[in-house]
Amino acid sequence: MASNPDLIRTDAVVRPDYRILFLLSLGHLAADINQGALPVLLPRLFTEYGLSYTLAGTIMMVFNFGSSIIQPLFGWYSDKKSALWLLPAGVFLASFGMAMMGLASNLILIMALVMLSGIGVASYHPEGSKAAHYASGAAKASAMSIFSVGGNLGFGLGAVIMAGFLAIGGIKGSIYLLIPGVLVAGLLWHFLPQISSGSGSRKKAAAAGLNPAKNSIKWLPLVVLCIIVVLRSFIQTGLITFIPLYVVTYLGAQETYSSTLVSIFLLAGAVGTVIGGPLADRYGKTRLLGFSMGLMPPLILLFLYSPPWLSMIALGLTGAVLISTFSTTIVLGQSFMPDSVGVASGLMLGFAIGTGGIGAVLLGVVADRVGIDVTMIILACLPLLGLMLTFLFASVQKKYLGQVS
């Protein structure tokens, strides 16, 4: 598996290094299995510890804080120094924290472990997406979708895997999550010398007399984009947190049905990611954002008010449409901060997504007060706000950049 880091230098002339992209995608999958496992574990914790909806949402918020909000700090560190060691370390920590949750003896220990797992996820994403950026060549959105699909597959497979482990070993079955974590961390460590950190590109820019510090950050479109990603995360986190609780506590369905729904949603999202990257490259990234937001309200309502077979189809389409813009927003963020790719990745993958995760707590409060059925209707309406923000984003791009990406 040979790769020359200095070869990945000019996006317009170098083809994507697919071997590196698939390796990074595998690491992304191993890290995000733990994110997918948590929503399936939540109903078991809900019963085991007699949690309220608010506390269940708080566990999700703690994980999102650890896994997402602090990502720009890792991105800043990544931009300052070569930090490829964060790739295997992040995968291992993410798996270790989540694996040990089933053996925790109290709620405080659960919170500490979920934070540790989150920090592992946070350390992997900026470095992984930065390495994917330097391996992506000219087709930015398409190549980034390869990296992103690993994470979305991890989300979906994490739900399936955790459901299987719970069936085999009860709540202590979470310990088996260490198996994929240790294996993939070892693989990443072995191939670490062949992954580019982008240092070759920065050295060549310096030799050519280019000063990255003088390349201004495009703040206005970046801020509007962050708000859109926060809202998208609000919707996604709300759905994966409250769909299991909705079908188990409100509809009276079995845990296996709830885990099946989460898996359908997230695996369909992985398919959406693969399709979304090429669509964004061909038809425009902002147009894809608007299309995604406009389709979600009818699909979520169809999920809520349809018979089971149609409900599953609607939820799968919701996941595909919602998550199809994942790689698109990463590429847009990196384009607005071209000389701070790690920070941009941390913002798009971390801070914006994690801040949106606070919505899980707010929605938990709503569910405790007015019912989880009302909460689900609110989730169905939120994409309409996202659609309006996308129109604003297009206007800002046209005024600020002279074009719409």
Image: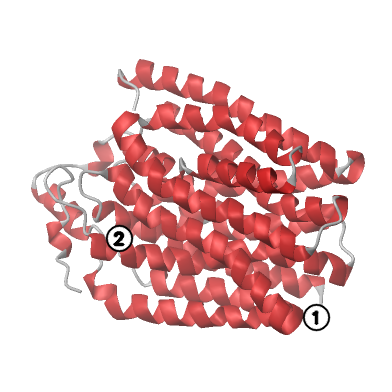
Query: Where residue 280 appears, x then y in whole percent?
Result: 35, 36
> Neighbour class for label 1 at 10 Å: few (<14), some, many (≥20)?
few
Question: Which of 172 and 269 lies nearest the eye of the viewer?
Answer: 269
In the rendered view, would you say 161 is above or below 309? below
Horizontal relation, residue 181 to residue 47: left or right? left
Camera-side residue: 252 or 117? 252
Left or right: residue 3 versus residue 72 is: left
Q: Pick the quarter of the image with the N terminus.
A: bottom left
Q: Residue 236: give x, y in percent of width and height.
A: 62, 45
Point 71% across, 53% down: residue: 241
Residue at image mark 2: 21
SS of the residue at dot 1? Answer: loop
Residue named by callout 1: 105
Q: Quadrant of residue 42?
A: bottom right
Q: Residue at x 59, y 62 (%)?
A: 35
Furthest residue toward left: 208
Identity of the residue drawn at 58% across and 66% down: 158
Element on which disc 2 rests: helix
Category of crowding for the residue at label 2, using alpha-carbon neighbours closer than 10 angstroms: few (below 14), some (14–19), many (at least 20): many
Classify residue 25 by image quadrant.
Answer: bottom left
Q: Position of residue 329 (x, y in %)?
A: 43, 40
| Above or below, 16 relative to 399 | below
Q: Is 118 situated above or below 372? A: below
Whichever of callouts 1 and 2 sits on the residue coming sooner in the sequence is 2
